[in-house]
């Protein structure tokens, strides 16, 4: 496949044009820079330009916006902090103020609002907790309450939704498991039920969907696979079929990945396609190991001495034996 030769072409294209989509710029930078790092190309981007841009996106309140003069939001705040970790440059922003901003987003029930306008979603819990963990300031918020809110979003199928009573969705399951993984509360998860639900996301094409009855999509490869990895149940899906599906989503010309074969490529699906391949141990491309909780290169986690939890000990109960065979078909 074209993987190695064209990744750099794609990322160059990405930095020249795609992230001109201003409302997503900092997240676009995180997707692109992470893809570049795991393909050993991070040094090809001008670090000072990136840092100076991020500095200008921080507001007086401490929060960080998608671009200069864009309103701050926890989503962009996390992306900015992740990028600064790659460059060991957290002092580019005012850390005390950003901690204060994140702290002010926590509500009485432990949930987090994304910004001052008050939308509540388990995605924002993950953004807040991951940001604070990267800043080594987890003690600034009420962790017990944050976990209890996540627990209140758990459904009968073991999955999680955006808020209490919302249906299970792979992206939100990833955010909830990420929050529990960082805070050391994975024991509250119904790991087998949830593992089954996640494994059932694999379709005959090998691709994964995010909810029952939906089409497969490369970004769900990441959310489902990272969740299974955190649960210690990554072997519950057919790895070879999954890898083939992701490779079919790569465009031969630009090197980027799309959501499913034949569609337009973009940096978002490129990062999640590459990250999924890294997680699956795809050896035909020289990809750095990715951390399933943070979606950041593992070596960065090691350097920062961050060790999010994982239920790595797979319980080999009888009802799982049937699934072992799926790897061989
Ligand atoms: Zn997608």
Image (cartoon, rainbow, N blue to C red):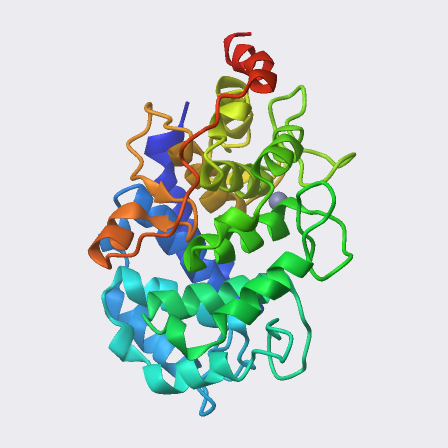
Q: Nearer the viewer, residue 173 or 67?
A: 173
Residue 234 seen in the current view:
yes
Percent of width and height locating residue 215: 72, 34
Q: Residue at x 42, y 61 (%)?
A: 29
Which residue ends up furthest to the bottom in the rendered image? Answer: 60
- Write down which quadrant ligand 1 falls in: top right
Percent of width and height locating residue 254: 46, 39
Side (left or right) of 133 relative to 200 = left
Q: Nearer the viewer, residue 191 or 177?
A: 191
Residue 26 seen in the current view:
no
Question: In this rendering, is residue 55 above or below 265?
Answer: below
Q: Residue at x 49, y 38 (%)?
A: 231
* Residue 199 sits in quarter: top right
Which residue ends up furthest to the top in the rendered image? Answer: 329
Q: Nearer the viewer, residue 123 or 70?
A: 123
Q: Residue at x 49, y 69 (%)?
A: 143
Side (left or right) of 272 relative to 89 = right
Q: Quadrant of the N terminus?
A: top left
Percent of width and height locating residue 154: 68, 52
């Amino acid at each position: 496949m074209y993987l190695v030769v064209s990744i750099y072409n794609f990322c160059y294209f990405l930095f020249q044009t795609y992230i001109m989509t201003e409302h997503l710029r900092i997240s676009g930078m995180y997707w692109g820079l992470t893809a570049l790092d795991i393909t050993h190309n991070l040094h090809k981007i001008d670090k000072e330009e990136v840092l100076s841009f991020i500095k200008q996106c921080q507001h007086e309140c401490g929060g960080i916006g998608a671009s200069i003069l864009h309103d701050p939001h926890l989503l962009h705040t996390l992306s900015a902090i992740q990028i600064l970790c790659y460059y060991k440059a957290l002092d580019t922003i005012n850390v005390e103020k950003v901690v204060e901003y994140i702290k002010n987003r926590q509500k009485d029930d432990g949930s987090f609002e994304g910004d001052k306008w008050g939308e509540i979603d388990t995605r924002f819990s993950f953004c807040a907790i991951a940001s604070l963990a990267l800043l080594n300031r987890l003690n600034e918020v009420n962790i017990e309450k944050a976990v209890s809110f996540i627990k209140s979003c758990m459904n009968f199928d073991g999955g999680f939704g955006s808020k209490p009573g919302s249906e299970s969705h792979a992206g939100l399951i990833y955010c909830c498991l990420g929050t529990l993984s960082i805070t050391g509360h994975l024991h509250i998860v119904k790991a087998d039920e949830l593992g089954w639900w996640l494994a059932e996301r694999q379709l005959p094409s090998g691709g994964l969907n995010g909810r029952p009855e939906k089409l497969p999509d490369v970004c769900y490869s990441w959310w489902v696979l990272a969740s299974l990895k955190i649960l210690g149940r990554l072997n519950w899906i057919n790895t070879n079929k999954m890898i083939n599906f992701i490779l079919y989503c790569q465009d031969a010309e630009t090197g980027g990945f799309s959501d499913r074969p034949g569609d337009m490529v973009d940096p978002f699906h490129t990062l999640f396609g590459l990250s999924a391949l890294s997680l699956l141990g795809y050896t035909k491309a020289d990809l750095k190991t990715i951390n399933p909780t943070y979606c950041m290169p593992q070596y960065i986690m090691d350097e920062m001495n961050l060790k999010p939890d994982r239920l790595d000990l797979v319980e080999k109960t009888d009802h799982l034996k049937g699934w072992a065979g799926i790897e061989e078909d």
